[in-house]
Structure formats: C-alpha cells, structure tokens
Image: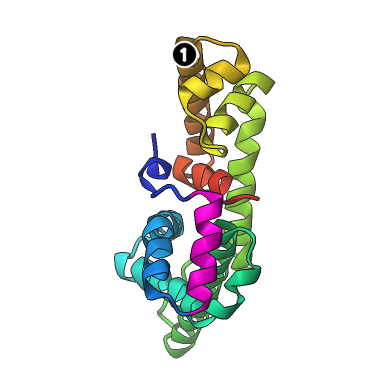
Amino acid sequence: MSALNVHIRITEEEERHLLSNVATGDWQAFTRLYEAYSPLIIHYLQVYLTDKHDVEEIGQEVFLKVWKKREILVTVRSFKNYVFIMARNALNDFLKARQALLQKQAGYSKDYVLPHYSADDKLITDQYESIARSGLDILSEKQRRIFLLRTRDEMTIQEIADAEGMSVGGVHKSLQQSTQQLKDYLARNGISFTLLLLILFFQP
C-alpha cells in the first residue's frame, strides 16, 4: 500500500522495553528502534528534499541525537511521535540554514537569482501537512473511518470488516475509492500521498 507497509512492527510493550534498555546504553535495542523507524523518517524527509545525501545526513543526525539523549527515553510515551518531531525540527533547521546560505550567495553576486522559498521556512512543512490532513475532509464519514483504521490504526482488512460489519470486498472497495480520491486531491495541491500516510502514522 505504501511505505507504511514495510516498517518493522513493534508492539507498545516491546517499545517500552526497548526504550528502557536504550536509556541504559543498550546498542542492540537502539539498533532495533533504528531499523523500525529509520525507513519512515527517510520517506518523510524525501517528501521535502530531493538530494539523497541531504536526506541520509539529516536522518542520521536525528538518530544520533536520539542516542546522545538516550537517558530521557524512559520518559517518552510514544517513540514514533518523539522521533517524528525530532525529524521535523531537523528538517526545518536544514531549510533555514540553506536559505541563509542562498541569501549570502545572493549578496556576493548581483547576477545570482535567489530561488523562491517561504519567508518562514517552518511554514513549508506546516502548510504541506495542513493540506495533507485537509484531504480527509473530502471523504464521507464512513470512508474516512475505514481509511484511518487501515492507515493510522494499522488494522487488517479482516479486522476492519469485522468491526464495521462489512464484507472484506466492501472494505477493499472503500479503501480503493478513498485512496484514489485522496491521491487526486493531493496531486492537485502538489502534495505527496506518502506525506499524508506518514502524518497519520506518526500522529498521537
């Protein structure tokens, strides 16, 4: 379905255990968290950045900070939200630094044309994510509920069918229609469908 289908599933109990172990310096536990969430962070960064080197560098920076601040992980209730916020902050810092560099280069050369960016770089991610979330409003209430059960809550098709009193085929049809509607809406606004899925996965 998306990048969300390739991540390593970690239960809440296992995550708490891993966070506790990482806080004490357990590198193996940290590696487990990295393998589970790094692909998702990379996909999120790729929505905004086209340079593979920049994406990998920021992704590594995020998890390096996680390791350096590992002692506080015992207080973290949701690691996926914690690391997503760190990724957003790192991305915004990178965008601001890049804009400052471009402005400096523009000052050195009268012939240099400054690329267009938002005056406030943080608005880049905020606006994109706001538009992505607003896409859910185009769905009917039932379509939206089924879509969120599948993407945000990671329920299986059978589990959704049982919960909604529907056939498996009915759930499939609803998801196909919702996905197509959302892709069309987001494409018209220049937003990646992957971004919406990542936002839904990482939200509290």
| Whole-percent x, y for residue 119 in the image | 63, 69
Q: Is residue 43 left or right of residue 14?
A: left
The colour scheme used to paint the residues is rainbow
Q: Amino acid at mark 1?
A: Val
* Residue under numbered circle 1: 168
Q: Quadrant of the N terminus?
A: top left
Is 154 a magenta residue?
no
Does dot 1 land on a helix, a strand or a loop? helix
Q: Residues within 10 Å of mark 1 (few under 14, many from 20)?
A: some
Q: Residue at x 58, y 71 (%)?
A: 73
Residue 20 visible in rendering: yes
Q: Is residue 84 above or below residue 192?
A: below
| Whole-percent x, y for residue 198 in the image | 50, 48
Q: Tell me which segment is drawn in magenta.
A: 11-24
Is 21 a magenta residue?
yes
Residue 164: quarter of image: top right
Residue 117 visible in rendering: no
Q: Residue at x 53, y 64 (%)?
A: 83
The answer to which of 18 and 147 lies nearer the viewer is 18
Q: Residue furthest left?
A: 52
Residue 20: quarter of image: bottom right
Q: Residue at x 31, y 70 (%)?
A: 53
| Whole-percent x, y for residue 127 in the image | 63, 53
Q: Is residue 72 above or below residue 9?
A: below
Q: Is residue 66 above or below residue 190?
A: below
What count of labels does the image hold? 1
| Whole-percent x, y for residue 37 in the image | 43, 58
Q: Residue at x 41, y 67 (%)?
A: 29
Magenta stretch: dominant SS? helix
